[in-house]
Image (cartoon, grey):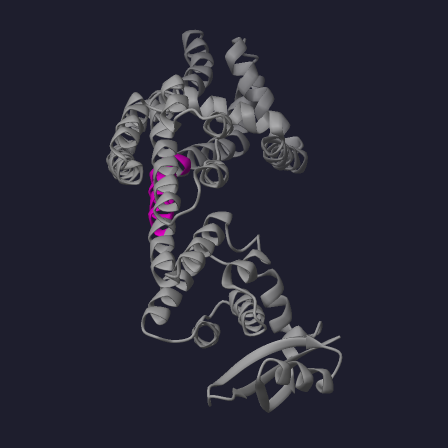
């Protein structure tokens, strides 16, 4: 099999480009004729050559979340302007600078020209496009308003992206401080402590337990620097691997839920994601059971996923959606269940969910801005304790020696 880039013309005069994986040029000509077009130009695609840099760029480069948002938004805008789906995809393929996304759009465009619907074509790339996006596109196609569905989808994805970016930004400051403190501590252990340890040894000083602990750590780092470095890297990878297991992920989810201040924000973040996703899917016409199933994938904390699975079972047995959330007020704030109940009573569940999402997104936004103020006291206590332990450990023997002089 080989890949070919080709330019073809439809019977109505529309010129389009595509990529096809076929045995040879003859099969390509036959394929395009079946699509109702004729080949204008064709060349073998060097981008799918294993010796090509472009091939490996398209194979292993990542697609950023914001690239997907732009793809969704721009596609909806071009469809609203009257462009055909295949032509809009062709424009986006040429426009995007990400090699992997460009290759993906090219294959989607080829599938669409062969008669596949957009959601089916997107579904062939589950690692690129989320089930949320595919479900909303499908609802738009079935409802006859794909541009509106793409617009709602891009808005939903952008809100989730902004929420995630704010949380990461809030956590950046304490992470930098902790890494800096750790680095300074290692330098002190390797460069400063050995000099003091030699001085204490020459003067036959009696060292307290804390000082012996610090010197012992320093000696290990000096004598086995490579081993210590490998050990630290090994611990990091072990923690990452453990967090990928079901038990490790469950433990991590529990820890974040019970951290002071952080736990409350975790609940509000998941409440915002749940409300926003359910609101978008419901407004697009996706049935409630499918919406809950997709929302489980959007909500990443396993405790909240369990609540959504329970809600799915309850709704399928005839219970109202709000009943499940009301029973789990330790995870979802009471306001969530109450607003859902009001929405069900008034027949405006989607609208109430949107209001819920906006409320909790604003709460998270406010708390992330205050995050540094909240975390600073904990950091000061930790840093003060570490510096105090080191100072007392090193200064105590010096005072003892000075008394004997």
Provide the major secondary structure of the magenta segment. helix
Image quadrant occupied by the N terminus: bottom right
Q: Residue furthest front?
A: 318
Whether residue 179 is situated above or below residue 59 in the rendered picture: above
The residue under the point 39% across, 48% down is 285
Give residue 7's position: percent from left, percent from top. 55, 86
Displayed quadrant of residue 58: bottom right
Image quadrant occupied by the C terminus: top left
Q: Nearer the viewer, residue 57 or 111?
A: 111
Q: Which residues are magenta?
A: 158-175
Q: Nearer the viewer, residue 282 or 306?
A: 282
Give residue 262's position: percent from left, percent from top. 36, 26
| Image mark count | 0
Q: In this image, 159 relative to 310: left or right?
A: left
Q: In this image, 261 relative to 134: left or right?
A: left
Q: Is residue 85 among what the camera can see?
A: yes
Give residue 113's position: percent from left, percent from top. 55, 74
Q: Is residue 121 magenta?
A: no
Q: Residue furthest bottom?
A: 40
Q: Is residue 162 magenta?
A: yes
The residue under the point 47% across, 13% down is 397
Whether residue 254 is situated above or below residue 364 in the rendered picture: above
Q: In this image, 317 relative to 75: left or right?
A: right
Whether residue 298 is situated above or below residue 55 in the rendered picture: above
């Amino acid at each position: 099999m080989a890949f070919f880039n080709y330019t073809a013309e439809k019977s109505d005069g529309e010129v389009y480009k595509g990529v096809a994986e076929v045995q040879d040029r003859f099969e390509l000509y036959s394929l395009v004729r079946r699509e109702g077009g004729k080949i204008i130009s064709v060349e073998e695609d060097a981008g799918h050559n294993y010796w090509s840099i472009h091939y490996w760029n398209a194979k292993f480069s990542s697609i950023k979340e914001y690239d997907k948002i732009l793809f969704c938004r721009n596609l909806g805008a071009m469809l609203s302007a009257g462009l055909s789906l295949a032509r809009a995809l062709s424009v986006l393929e040429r426009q995007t600078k990400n090699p992997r996304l460009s290759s993906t759009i090219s294959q989607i465009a080829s599938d669409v020209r062969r008669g596949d619907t957009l959601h089916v074509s997107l579904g062939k790339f589950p690692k690129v496009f989320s089930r949320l996006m595919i479900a909303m596109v499908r609802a738009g196609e079935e409802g006859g308003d794909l541009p509106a569905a793409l617009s709602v989808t891009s808005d939903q994805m952008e809100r989730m992206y902004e929420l995630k970016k704010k949380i990461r930004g809030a956590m950046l400051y304490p992470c930098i401080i902790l890494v800096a403190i750790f680095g300074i501590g290692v330098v002190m252990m390797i460069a400063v402590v050995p000099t003091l340890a030699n001085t204490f040894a020459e003067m036959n000083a009696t060292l307290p337990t804390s000082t012996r602990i610090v010197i012992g750590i320093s000696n290990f780092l000096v004598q086995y620097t490579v081993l210590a470095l490998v050990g630290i890297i090994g611990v990091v990878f072990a923690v990452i691997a453990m967090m990928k297991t079901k038990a490790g992920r469950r433990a991590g989810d529990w820890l974040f839920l019970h951290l002071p201040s952080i736990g409350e924000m975790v609940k509000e973040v998941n409440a915002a994601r749940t409300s926003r996703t359910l609101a978008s899917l419901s407004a697009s016409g996706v049935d409630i059971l499918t919406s809950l199933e997709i929302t489980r994938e959007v909500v990443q904390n396993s405790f909240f996923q369990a609540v959504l699975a329970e809600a799915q079972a309850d709704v399928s047995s005839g219970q109202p959606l709000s009943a499940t959330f009301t029973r789990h007020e330790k995870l979802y704030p009471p306001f969530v269940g109450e607003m859902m109940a009001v929405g069900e009573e008034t027949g405006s569940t989607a609208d109430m969910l949107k209001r819920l999402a906006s409320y909790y997104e604003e709460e998270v936004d406010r708390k992330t801005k205050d995050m540094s103020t909240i975390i600073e006291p904990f950091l000061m206590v930790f840093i003060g304790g570490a510096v105090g332990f080191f100072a007392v450990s090193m200064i105590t023997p010096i005072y003892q020696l000075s008394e004997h002089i």
